[in-house]
Image (cartoon, rainbow, N blue to C red):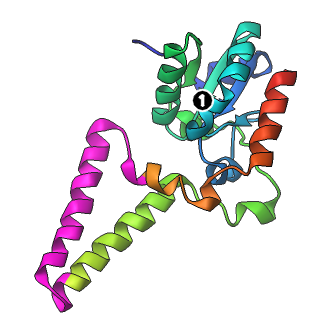
Amino acid sequence: MTIAAIDPRQAKTRLHELVVIDVRTPGEYAGGHVPGALNIPLDQLDRALPDIRDAAERGEVLVVCASGARSEKACLRLAEKGIHTATLAGGTGAWAAQGHELDRPLACDVKSAWSMDRQVRLTAGSLVLLGLALGEFVHPGFRLLSAGIAGGLVFSAVTNTCGMAAMLGKLPYNRPRKADLDAALARLRSL
């Protein structure tokens, strides 16, 4: 199935007529998002299906993430439910690279928000170092931890998925508070 992709320049000119849904974690969303985007994390998409379906019947829905991988996955899931959407080509990374501004909450909130990419790099690097250190000083078998992380990163690149990001997305600071998701759904209903 082919997912429609909208270039950031085209999306910028049509932003006033699009319903934009950002499927990243709340922490990533807080770090900067397409102006007017509603944060409905990928793992909460099923809860929002009726509201997204209604929004898609009223106008075009653009799904956004950091690079386009999660938004494409969301578009596929929505298409399976009969909801037609488009993805932002290249995600917020491409949006910002083309010079378009990102909305950010108050500066005090942004300091604590790390992008998922940054969280994955920190976790993967830490686990590789831990495996090497334990392999050197405790038992050589701990080097398998480093090899496993390396294999996971290669698999992630080849499949354009990331199991570590999925696991990190379940941590409390990456999960939406019920009030935040309810507010996003209320805004979606009012559009």
Name the quarter where the C terminus is drawn: top right
The N terminus lies in which quarter of the figure?
top left
Residue 103: x and y, percent?
76, 44
Q: Would you say the magenta stretch is mainly helix, strand or loop?
A: helix
Q: Label 1 belongs to which residue?
A: 46
Magenta stretch bounds: 135-164
Q: Position of residue 118 (x, y in %)?
A: 50, 59
Instruction: Tell me what residue is drawn at x 25 percent, y 76 percent.
Output: 131
**Quick check: 59 left or right of 10?**
right
Residue 145, image x, y percentages? 23, 69
Using the rendered image of the protein, determine whether residue 25 is visible from the camera's viewpoint.
Answer: yes
Question: Where 25 falls versus 172 (above or below)?
Answer: above
Residue 65 shown left or right of residue 185 in the figure: left
Q: Is residue 1 above or below residue 141?
A: above
Q: Is residue 91 left or right of residue 20?
A: left
Three-letter amino acid code of the residue under disc 1: Asp
Residue at 67% from the left image edge and 37% from the top image edge: 40
Residue shown at 55% from the left, 23% from the top = 87
Q: Position of residue 5 (x, y in %)?
A: 52, 18
Above or below, 77 against 114 in this view is: above
Q: How many marks?
A: 1
Q: Viewer-proximal residue, 162 or 33?
A: 162
Return the residue found at the far right.
Answer: 190
Q: Residue furthest left?
A: 140
Front in this rendered view, residue 47 or 109:
47
Element carrying mark 1: helix
Does the magenta-highlighted stretch encompass residue 130?
Answer: no
Residue 103 visible from this viewpoint: no
Q: Report crowding for label 1: few under 14, some 14 to 19, many 20 or more residues within 10 A (C-alpha).
A: some
Q: Is residue 152 magenta?
A: yes
